[in-house]
Image (cartoon, rainbow, N blue to C red):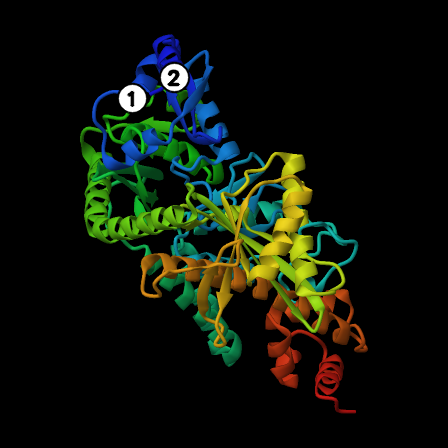
Amino acid sequence: MNETLKVKLSNLTKEPGCYLMKDKNDQIIYVGKAKNLHNRVNQYFVGSHDYKTTKLVSNIHDFDFIICKSEKEALVLEINLIKKYRPRYNIMFIDDKSYPYIKLTKELYPTLTVVREAKKDRKSKYFGPYPDASAAHQTIEILNKLYPLRKCNKMPKKVCLYYHLGQCLGPCEYEIDPNVYDNMVKEIVDFLNGNTQHLLTDLKEKMYKQSEALNFEKAQEYNEMIKAIEHISDKQNIENENKANMDAFAYYADKGYISIQGFFVRRGIVLGKEFKLKPLYGDASEEFISFVMQYYQNHPFSNELVLPKEIDIDALNEVLDVKIFQPQKGYRQKIIDMAINNAKEQLLLKFENQNNQDSLLQASVEEFSALMNKDIHRIELFDNSHIQGAFNVSACVVFEDGLPSKKDYRLYKLGKYISDIDSMKEVIYRRYFRMLNEGGIFPDCILVDGGIMQINAAKEILEQLDIKMLVCGLVKDDKHNSANLINDKNEIIDIRHDSNLFFMLARMQDEVHRFAISYHRKLRTKAQSASILDEIEGVGSVRKKELLKKFKSFKQLKNASIEQLKEVVPEQVAKNIFNTLHNEV
């Protein structure tokens, strides 16, 4: 530890606040909070630590701190700093998958939709989460058949297709008694809260009446709806002794990892669970609290939040707008015990495989750093794609310590194609000129797809921008497989093709190629389908969107029969599309 760092540590305040650990490049690599900044930050530099914390400490060359008035203020600031800087050693949960919710808006003419970003607001009511996304969409489909709520996001001037299908009352054009919507909303809320018996009884009566009237097609429709409702209800039919709505989270930490287990309980029914296993660099309880804060950045609160009794919830109580329980007995304690046991079992099951993967990846990164004679943590790879100069695009993917950082991926539409070398110059210039202007994080190494000509093209642009950066190339063989690594002196760097480093570089090259070619195909398909469909009589912008939404791609649209096309557009328009795509008159 250098003398400057020792002096800063000894004079550090004992007030609450946040600390920001920095590496030798002055990049923030870890953010934490503390009731007592002096005690917490000094803990990193005294005593023994596990391997992962030792790795973090070895990269700390300096730190900053921000004094806060209270632990509550420090907790909120910590989350905002993590979101802003996304430090390498912080546990990130914000970008992880989010479960779907059903959203019922509180409007004069309400709407019902499936959403992922379910941030609580006063204008909407949320139901869920639904760990099975298909169940959420199936539920919406049933409710749309039963209740003719408004379907459009913005109120149009005239009734649309949904009105003619009987799935909307047409409030855009007709005056509707507010009581009609109030009654529908009440029944929908009952349904989503699990009170389906009254609705099932009503549907069965309607089914029997239609059957007696020999209207078997309508009777069959009611029968299918009954079966769908019973199916959804059966999937959640779990015995329980408490009808509460709660989120329960607990954790288990061991072997340098933290395992977090959550259960979503609605009406006393365990709808699903949340599981995370992450490397642990700081205090387990603090990381757990960080998870809870991050989780509710993207999810609405339940009626209750249940946490283990050993967690200090003073700051959470001030920040989160939800009632927090720390039970010692009863049903809530059973849920917490179940969460802890699950977290422990999951950690033990996944630890060996995860640890082996981490060890191999770390060894590969260290080997690459040794070959380059510098520490390599952040790598950016570029690949270009075009067809005879058309749809000229480029992609940039970013890896940190061997893992993809997808939030940093970028796609580029390039100018008129001249040559692969000019395309490489354009994307390098656009990428790093913008970084210079915006203060972005520069990589330790650039890997281009190609040999010395592509390397020199990248170096020429970097020199013009006065940026010093290591540039290497990844060359493929005649079978388009990763073959060699070439440095900026046109020297082939010897890497065994059965080594972990070679496989890591090959995965990186495959990822940037996948990302580039996917974008290229998307633009090509969009242009192809748009240009042809625009020429077909009866196909406007709305029908074009509906067709592409239904058939997903131009290839599937071309393979569709007239009968399949008629599901989206009128018969004559379907024939026009089919004949045009098959060159028939």
Q: Nearer the viewer, residue 229 or 513?
A: 513
Residue 164: give its label.
Answer: none
Marks 1/2: CA distance? 10 Å
Q: Count of labels shown? A: 2
Amino acid marked by disc 1: Phe
At 44% from the left and 26% from the top, the residue drawn is 78
The residue to which callout 1 is attached is 45
Q: Is residue 485 left or right of residue 288?
A: right
Q: From the viewer's perspective, is residue 285 above or below residue 397?
A: above
At 42% from the left and 37% from the top, the residue drawn is 88
Amino acid marked by disc 2: Leu
Q: Is residue 340 left or right of residue 294?
A: left
Percent from the top left, x then y, of residue 317? 38, 22
What is the secondary structure assignment of the residue under circle 2?
A: helix
The quarter of the picture where the N terminus appears is: top left
Of the numbered discs 1 and 2, the one sitting upstream in the chain is 2
What is the secondary structure assignment of the residue under circle 1?
A: loop
Q: Is residue 267 visible?
A: no
Dot 1: within a 10 Å radius of its alpha carbon, few (fewer than 14), some, or many (20 or more) residues?
A: some
Do the residues under discs 1 and 2 have CB atoms within 8 angstroms?
Answer: yes
Percent from the top left, x then y, of residue 66? 47, 17
Q: Nearer the viewer, mark 1 or mark 2?
A: 2
Dot 2: within a 10 Å radius of its alpha carbon, few (fewer than 14), some, or many (20 or more) residues?
A: few
Q: Is residue 421 left or right of residue 9?
A: right
The residue to which callout 2 is attached is 5
At 81% from the left and 78% from the top, the residue drawn is 537
